[in-house]
Amino acid sequence: MVSQHQPPPSLTSIQQLQELRQELHQKGILEKSITQFPTKIISNSQRITVNWDGDAIELLSQLAHQRGLTFAYTGVRLPLPIAIHEKDISFEDLLRVIRTQIDWRAKLEQHSIELRLYFMLPLKKEH
């Protein structure tokens, strides 16, 4: 009797999901894009257009870079899915929109040289 090693079903499912997502992205069906995004955001009042469906950390990292800030997070990184579709919004208002979508799991602060995300500690179950 010959036994073939098969990966655990969960690993196979994850790989299939990643392959499907990559295929959809390549075909342009799945888009995580930022349109009309300037190469540099010079002030919090500068207006930008953002179309984003994805993880907040990815978007915040890019926004921080464009604004000339460093990006960092504190705590255990958890998924923060957001959907942003804003036209001609100020950088400051965009951060407000992001905060409303993530405040259940994380707190976002802008400092003079840094954009920082603080993940909240998970609630402990009482016995």
Image (tube, rainbow, N blue to C red):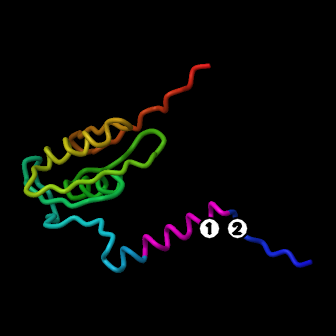
Residue at x 16% of width, y 64% of height: 37
Q: Amino acid at mark 2?
A: Pro
Residue at x 25% of width, y 45% of height: 98
Which quarter shows the N terminus? bottom right
Label placed on residue 7: 2
Mark 1 lies on a secondary structure that is helix
The percent position of residue 58, horizontal first and vertical second, equals 34, 57
Q: In the rendered view, would you say 85 is above or below 107?
A: below
Other-residue count near label 2 (Cα within 10 Å), few / some / many at <14 / 14–19 / ≥20:
few
**Which quarter of the picture shows residue 106?**
top left
| Farthest-out residue, front | 1
Label placed on residue 34: none
Other-residue count near label 1 (Cα within 10 Å), few / some / many at <14 / 14–19 / ≥20:
few
Reply yes or no: does residue 18 show up in magenta: yes
The percent position of residue 46, horizontal first and vertical second, equals 7, 53
Which range of residues does the magenta coloring cover?
A: 9-22
